[in-house]
Image: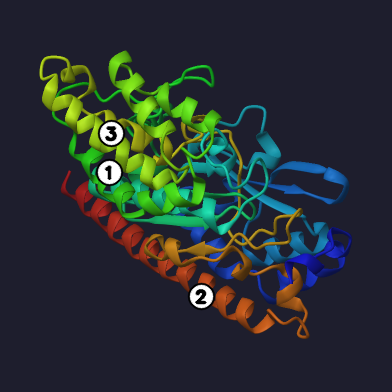
Amino acid sequence: MVGQYDENVLPDMLPVYYTRLFPQNLFCRWLSCGNSPQPLSNRELSFTLADDVYLRYLSINNQKEFFTLLQKKCPHKLDIGAVYNTKPSVGRHDAVVLARELVFDIDLTDYDEVRTCCQEAKVCDKCWKFMVVACEIINAALKDDFGFQSILWVFSGRRGIHCWISDYEARTLDSPGRAAVADYLCLIMGGENQSKKVHLGSDNLHSSIRRALIVIDKYFDDIVQDQEFLSTSDRLKSFLKMIPDEALRKQVQENLERMPTSSIDRWKCFVNNYNQFCKENLHGMRKMKYLIEEIKIQYCYPRLDVNVTKGFNHLLKSPFSIHPKTGKVSVVFKPDNAKDIKLDEIPTIYTLLDDSSSDNVQHQTNMRTAVKNFQELVFSLEKAEAVRRKTEANTSLEF
């Protein structure tokens, strides 16, 4: 079980894990498609060893070399970098980045101003719902608005999720293109000193925002009940700061402070107050046309680390890497199944390798599911790459 995990035994367990359970073949095939048309050896890998020894600019030519390197170095953490015009271990000072999956990093610590069940590195099933909402919103936008298909979702191992887009068009995006995608997906703006961080204006909402709100509405009541956004005086004070109209803010404050502390009841009361206020103040409601939607977005919309997406040089943890602090596997999951994930059912290196663990059977099953999810993505990516190369070849022949 997770409580029995001991970081000190990691060096003994990792060689066994990498040999028996890490999907080396699929991993190398995934990287090979992500490298195309460059050789696999042009991809940067990074290992974090015991005592935080950090090795960058590693490279491999094939799966056999990868297996040898894993056994020799036994990394506590495995990160993936960009594809260069040369082997990074040889010419890293002059190397030029040619490609990189379009990646997103969503971390629950960025929700600390709104989540109340946990803070910092702590995570529970209640705040995991923020990740469910993020996954569903981002996945739909990537598919519907950008047409991407090869989208890999991975649990980070501790407190968040990673998304890797391997479509050729995504891999070859330049920095401005990556920044444009990231900015398109960002709705929450402003630092910690800014109370209201979402401003949708008064025009008709963009279809992507309406779609995101449909996702939020599926989970909003549950999240409000779990997080109790309005249950204490401090939380209520933060909430009231998001109401720009002084008259409405004062009215809502008076009404909510007279109520019991149930956040869901207080929220419903606020909605009723807002609707009534808008009916009575038609001229003044324009600046608050989407206030309810803005507050929902500020509480629940994905909070992206845009610097990870914009840059080429940022390393990101590999799928099926072990998180050294938790022992959990960075499992691959399907976005439709994010809502069914239970954190205590995510495999750990301990439970996978200890047949006597009470969680062994469950975690073994979940590990196989994660590998199958990865396999399906790799097969799909290989087919897409084959079609792309054939199309490119036919196009070049026509000229």
Which residue matches tag 2?
A: 369
Quadrant in which residue 15 is drawn:
bottom right
Q: Which amino acid does label 1 sit on?
A: Leu
Residue 39 visible in the displayed image? no
- Residue 209 vertical placement versus 376 (above, below): above
Q: Classify residue 335 as left or right of residue 315.
A: left
Residue 171 visible in the displayed image? yes
Give the mark nearer the N terminus: 1 vs 2. Answer: 1
Q: In front: mark 1 or mark 2?
A: 1
Q: Position of residue 185 (x, y in %)?
A: 35, 35
Q: Label 1 to label 2, Cα distance in Å? A: 30 Å
Mark on residue 278? none
Q: Where is residue 54 in the image (x, y as percent from the top left)?
A: 79, 42
Identify the secondary structure beneath mark 3.
helix
Q: What residue type is labelled 3?
A: Ile
Q: Label 1 to label 3, Cα distance in Å? A: 11 Å
Identify the secondary structure beneath mark 2.
helix
Residue neighbourhood size for the residue with mark 1, other residues' Cα within 10 Å, grouped as few (<14), some (14–19), many (≥20): many
Q: Where is residue 66 in the image (x, y as percent from the top left)?
A: 68, 61
Mark on residue 292? 3
Q: In front: mark 3 or mark 2?
A: 3
Which residue matches tag 1?
A: 213
Q: Nearer the viewer, residue 119 or 8?
A: 119
Q: What residue type is labelled 2?
A: Thr
Q: Which of 389 and 158 is in front in this view?
A: 158
What residue appears at the point 11 percent right and 15 percent down from the top-left corner?
283
Give the mark nearer the N terminus: 3 vs 2. Answer: 3
